[in-house]
Image (tube, helix red, strand yellow):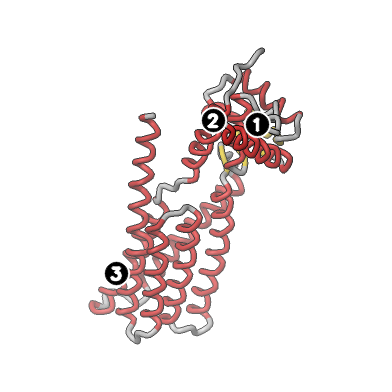
Amino acid sequence: MFKELDPILHSQLRLAVMSLLISVKEAEFTFIKEKTNATAGNLSVQVQKLKEAGYIDVSKQFKDNYPLTICKITKKGVKAFEEYVTSLQSYLGKN
Amino acid sequence: MTEPNLSEQESLQIIKQMIDTAKQEQKDDGKGWIIWGWLLFTASILSFINHYTAWVSQYFFWNIFGIASLLLLLYSVYQFLFVKKTKRVSTYTSALFEQLNIGFFISLSLIILSMNTRGVNPIQGFALLLGLYGFWILIYGAALNFKPSVIGAYFTWACAFASLYVNNFSLTMLIHAIAVLGGYIIPGYIANREFSKSIVEKNRN
């Protein structure tokens, strides 16, 4: 039996965001946008979905009156990502 | 909004690509090693020459170095407290290095103070300083998987042991300069070259 891939993570942009965040301590929204080549609107939507799933923490700060959005992966997010990779490996092993 | 269906291979490719992108952020340009390396090297070599020419007092160049370091430290504290810089990304290694820098500075101050106020012989004091440099160099090399610094750390420690057994201040200064060359300057330039190369490659892709 193959484990079903987590639908929250099995999306191009959400997976890219999570893969990026798992490798760093925290990252600013504009950094993620630049590295994933996403549009601000689409990224906001996907970040919100990850936040609602409890996979990332999003905090708002201000610098020189400009808002900054800092994203950080949570323990739940790390666990979900690891499970996703394990499931992925089992699928790849099947082929 | 419907999303395109992802194949397992595509998922794996995304993960790999993003992890590689994040790895790029962990790279260091080596400039810190180069700047501090040349400052330490210059102070050591000038002190070595001064030992024979007696232009100024024995520790003149180290006092100048100390004042410059103190000013740099005050500037860093000011930047930290009053100029809030927001980093776009914080990696685990950069967070670790920030803490280690504080620990390194405290340990450094302890040795320098013991030399200046508690009667620790400067020859042995410089050997202890080299031992401390070696520790920081090794952690840097190990954390960034950067072999030249790992080798540089052992080289610095070898110099520290050698320095401990000399009885001549000028020789201590010469060993100190050689240690800094092998532990700071050369690995710093290699790191800088690799960093520049990785930037060129990144821009090409």
Q: Which of B41 and B5 is in front in this view?
A: B5
Mark pair 2, 1: CA separation: 23 Å
Q: Which residue is drawn at 50% across and 33% down?
A: B17
State whether residue A72 appears in this view. no
Query: What is the x, y in percent for residue A71?
Result: 65, 35
Q: Which residue in the structure is indicated by mark 3?
A: B46
Quarter where residue B158 is shown: bottom left
- Residue type for callout 1: Thr
Identify the subunit bearing mark 3.
B
Q: Residue at x 58, y 28 (%)?
A: B8
Mark pair 1, 3: CA separation: 50 Å
Query: What is the x, y in percent for residue B18?
Result: 53, 34
Position above or below: B137 against B191: below
Position above or below: B94 against B118: above
Q: Which residue in the structure is indicated by mark 1?
A: A69
Label 2 residue SS: helix
Quarter where residue B62 is shown: bottom left
Q: Do the residues labelled 2 and 1 touch (CB within 8 Å)?
A: no
Q: Do the residues labelled 2 and 3 touch (CB within 8 Å)?
A: no
Q: Do labels 2 and 3 share a chain?
A: yes
Q: Do labels 2 and 1 share a chain?
A: no
Label 1 residue SS: strand
Q: Which residue in the structure is indicated by mark 2?
A: B14
Q: Residue at x 59, y 22 (%)?
A: B6
